[in-house]
Amino acid sequence: MGTTAVIIIDVLNPYEHADAKLLQRAVEKTVGPLADLVRRAHDEPDVQLVYVNDNYGDFAASRDDIEARALKGHRPDLVEPVRPPHGCAFLPKVRHSAFYGTGLDYLLRSNDVTSVVLAGQVTEQCILYSALDAYVRHFDITVARDCVAHIHEDLAEAALRMMERNMSASLVRGQEVFSSGAAGSF
Amino acid sequence: MGTTAVIIIDVLNPYEHADAKLLQRAVEKTVGPLADLVRRAHDEPDVQLVYVNDNYGDFAASRDDIEARALKGHRPDLVEPVRPPHGCAFLPKVRHSAFYGTGLDYLLRSNDVTSVVLAGQVTEQCILYSALDAYVRHFDITVARDCVAHIHEDLAEAALRMMERNMSASLVRGQEVFSSGAAGSF
Amino acid sequence: MGTTAVIIIDVLNPYEHADAKLLQRAVEKTVGPLADLVRRAHDEPDVQLVYVNDNYGDFAASRDDIEARALKGHRPDLVEPVRPPHGCAFLPKVRHSAFYGTGLDYLLRSNDVTSVVLAGQVTEQCILYSALDAYVRHFDITVARDCVAHIHEDLAEAALRMMERNMSASLVRGQEVFSSGAAGSF
Amino acid sequence: MGTTAVIIIDVLNPYEHADAKLLQRAVEKTVGPLADLVRRAHDEPDVQLVYVNDNYGDFAASRDDIEARALKGHRPDLVEPVRPPHGCAFLPKVRHSAFYGTGLDYLLRSNDVTSVVLAGQVTEQCILYSALDAYVRHFDITVARDCVAHIHEDLAEAALRMMERNMSASLVRGQEVFSSGAAGSF
């Protein structure tokens, strides 16, 4: 049947970039549902929880550095609740897609993952691009709708429609993710 | 400085898929400007003209087969004017992005290409996804706005805004592509 | 369980490159067993036969062009017996490995291939490099020992030992490939 | 002209795998020259020093974890002298080649690297496979001969000949790497 991976994208963010203000406003709403999704994914025995996070151009940064910098940034309150649990997979990424220049494809295939649940930010950028790279590789895609944060609402709405219509993604609420009936594969 | 490649995506289409009707309506308007862009790109001495076209799941199909089938499809009038000129590069692709599972990245780098002009179809699918894959690789992107055809207009509009805002793409008319002033690199 | 693909590498060769003389001498011996392997793979119902062949830097060349040029080269007698059967998959490649810049990975995964049989040329170059790329992706590897041709015998011997020792490849005779007992997966 | 990167492969090793004994014997001889090469590469202003190291299947391991485990392994004396200097790039890898499933290609291109110097282990495995992946991407290759360690001497000798003959690699001593005259690109 294949197993499921929950992929948490770019939540370790110091919020110092241009557009960070717009993004924060959205994350204020998603951080709660996302923290809940992370907790439940971590507890679920057959689910692979994977964080994929930008290294922000610093190839010397370790996982701990990336986390520490986010916690020292402008909005530690948006980072603290979604810190990666101890022992969960963590892949630094170098560009927008979680697949580009990372071991994500290898990690998923090694664990017989056939379904991915995407959450994090930014809906109309890294989430959309990662969904595309999952789609061309034939992974089933679920987007936890209340766990993805946008910069521009109009583009985010379009991105969600693209994922649903053109990539056959299921859009569900975070709390539906592991309940029976959602997303087919659970 | 780097050179420019004009990449023509998925114009060899028998128009037999679901949604083909919607697409045809858009292509009826783009086929003229696109044929003109192809002609001019082919004549331009320092421009690399590259066709990248889906093999529609037939890995035994040659370039000639793909072209012949499109010409025998529902709308040869939409294919004939944009047939790849003799001697231009042609890469079969297997999924939506022109970069995925093809030699396009290698071809572009081997020719010192730093700017790509995207044209063809479908704006909110293969064009958008190819733009993304060009963007993560740091190619400058120009989209020939009147030479890209959509299935759904709302998603296409959003896709163009995404490329402009988030991938720094220049949106220009096909006839502006090699005129000075357009797209920085010309 | 997964299925098996037989991958025939670079046998469409005009033999005009440096070292072509050395290669021809080896191919004179392998062309017979290889033609037999191709025929049997083509007839075997559950086996995927795939040709992957260099485009020799010509990105405009179609499958037919590549074949025609090889047949017009120095040694058509080494090409004719191993021409790709009608209807078998054919992927042009751009560099040494059959996986680099091609849709091979996608094709194999789409067909649930878990075992690959490698044949063709050059043992210590494209065969070795393709074996490596198969190995990092966890495909089981079989090399049809009498169906791979070398330029330098000493390097070819080392390449075969590398594949056997470090990539867990099975080295078998071509005629053993689909007999029970060989290569585990048959 | 392009700049040079020195790539140090898999030196953070707890030496607990099968064959570790054979490898240790070789590393006893290479660790000195390699430590010297690392020091000089780190001081050289225009050289990019990059460590690429296996995560040994633990996708939760940070850079610090990988280093700490190697130092707690069987041979800390072979690890301590070649620890990555503070601030140098570090990429975890998932399989043998330093390019597969990593951001190395992206890192090199972003820094206009055209020449790579390879050092570390194992000569006939990760060094050879990384050389191949550098070669298909047209990087100039130098192998610091006394800074690469093998498991099997016969295969290592063949691997070095393959890199020299078929990948146009320069084989030099570590101390020659940044002296004029060696490796063309310095």
Image (cartoon, coloured by chain):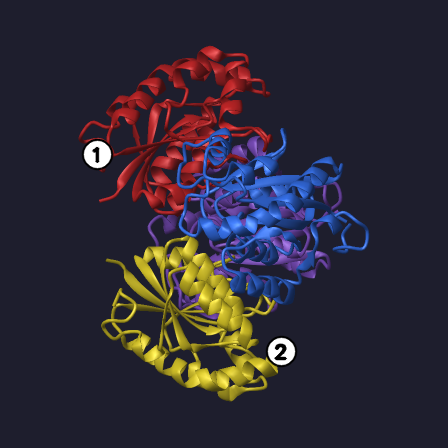
Chain colours: A purple, B red, C blue, D yellow
Is residue C135 placed above or below A181 in the rendered structure?
A: below
Please state the horizontal and vertical placement of residue B83, each as a whole percent of the image.
Answer: 41, 20
Residue type highlighted by circle 2:
Asp
Q: Label 2 marks which chain's residue? A: D
Residue type highlighted by circle 1:
Phe
Left/right of residue A118 with respect to residue D130 in the rendered view: right
Q: Label 1 marks which chain's residue? A: B
Mark 2 packing: few (<14 Cα in 10 Å), some, or many (20+)? few
Q: Which residue is mark 2?
A: D19
Q: Residue at x 49, y 86 (%)?
A: D28
Mark 1 packing: few (<14 Cα in 10 Å), some, or many (20+)? few
Q: Which residue is mark 1?
A: B186
Residue sitting at the far right: C180
Please state the horizontal and vertical placement of residue C21, each as a whole percent of the image.
Answer: 46, 50
Where disc 1 sits, the SS reads: loop
Q: Nearer the viewer, mark 2 or mark 1?
A: 2
